[in-house]
Amino acid sequence: MAEWQLAQLNIAHLKEPLDSELLVDFVANLDSINALAEQSPGFLWRLIDADADDLPNFGFDSEYIVNLSVWDSIESLHDFVYRSAHLDVMRRKNEWFEQMPRAHMVLWWLPVGDRPGPADVMAKLDHLQKCGPTPTAFTFRQAFEKPT
């Protein structure tokens, strides 16, 4: 019987470059929010630039930032996103990021121990954008149970 973990990808379109005055508060919070994620129950892994083999943005240009992580469950990721200090930063997203016209966050089930690769990540986002939420790629709003 396969065991599963939850992968998540979130993309944000920056209003200005990361070193701009507009994004000072966002950048100032990055290390503490990443540390909070890493210490959160259920956190398993996150992409760090050094892990990315020259693909930290999966083909997106420098106007975008990409967050990719793996969690043990939807509930643990949900708690981090909506029930921790992360929420305080997230409430300010409209100050820092452009509104995305298409899906920019995707969740999917991944076998335990696997790490999402660039082709898989982009395929999941593309699937969600084209098909909407399915067991292959979904959102918090319309999540799917772990495969059996």
Image (cartoon, helix red, strand yellow):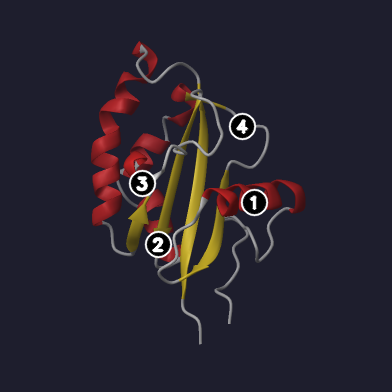
Q: Quadrant of residue 79?
A: bottom left
Residue carrying label 2: 71
The label shown at residue 135 is none
> Which type of secondary structure does the marked residue at label 2 adopt?
strand
Residue carrying label 3: 51
Q: Residue at x 34, y 61 (%)?
A: 44
Give the x, y percent position of residue 93. Answer: 45, 30
**Quadrant of the image containing the C terminus:** bottom right
Q: Is residue 66 above or below residue 97?
A: below
Q: Is residue 125 above or below residue 19?
A: below
Tell me the distance, in whole angstroms, between the alpha carbons under discs 1 and 3.
Answer: 20 Å
The label shown at residue 123 is 1
Q: Which three-letter amino acid code belongs to the residue tagged 1? A: Ala
Residue carrying label 4: 100
Query: Position of 104 compared to 29: left or right?
Result: right
Tell me the distance, in whole angstroms, between the alpha carbons under discs 2 and 4.
Answer: 24 Å
Give the x, y percent position of residue 81. Answer: 40, 50
Q: Which three-letter amino acid code belongs to the residue tagged 3? A: Asp
